[in-house]
Amino acid sequence: MRTTVNLDDDLLSEAERVSGIKERAALVNAGMRALIERESARRLARLGGSDPLLEAVPRRRSDAAG
């Protein structure tokens, strides 16, 4: 899809420098992928490793066996 956007020149130059990506479309796509990954990780971290609706999972062996 073709879209016109106004990009900060300094930010674009810094992104090109640190990533090594020179093609603008590839640079913007990489930035969007990085944003999606970061926000997905942030959402997962907010769960705190728990699901309040999850039922207790039965263990495979009894306490006496371990």
Image (cartoon, rainbow, N blue to C red):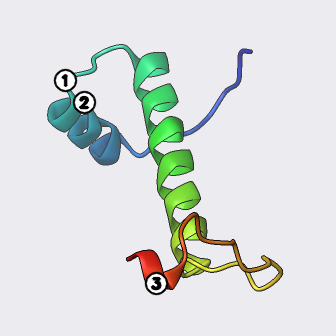
Q: Are marks 2 and 1 in contact (CB under 8 Å)?
A: yes
C-alpha separation, residue under disc 3 versus residue under disc 2: 59 Å
Which three-letter amino acid code belongs to the residue tagged 2?
Glu
Q: Mark 2 points at which residue?
A: 16
Q: Is residue 27 above or below residue 36?
A: above
| Residue 41 point in image, percent of width and height | 50, 60
The amino acid beneath tag 1 is: Gly
- Residue 61's label in the rendered image is none
Mark seen at residue 20: 1
Residue linked to disc 3: 64
Judged by depth in the image, the label closer to the viewer, 3 or 1, is 3
Element carrying mark 2: helix
Q: Residues within 10 Å of mark 2 (few under 14, many from 20)?
A: some
Asked whether 27 or 63 is in front, the reply is: 63
First-in-chain label (3 vs 1): 1
Please, is residue 7 above or below residue 48 in the view?
above
Q: Which residue is drawn at 53% across and 39% down?
A: 32
Mark 3 packing: few (<14 Cα in 10 Å), some, or many (20+)? few
Q: Is residue 6 visible?
A: yes
Crowd around label 1: few <14 · some 14–19 · many ≥20 (10 Å): few
Res. 7 visible in picture: no
Q: Decide which of 34, 44 is in the foreground and name it.
A: 44
Amino acid type, callout 3: Ala
Quadrant, the C terminus: bottom left
Give the residue furthest to the right.
Answer: 53
Tell which tag, 3 or 2, sits nearer the viewer.
Answer: 3
The CA distance from mark 3 to mark 1 is 57 Å
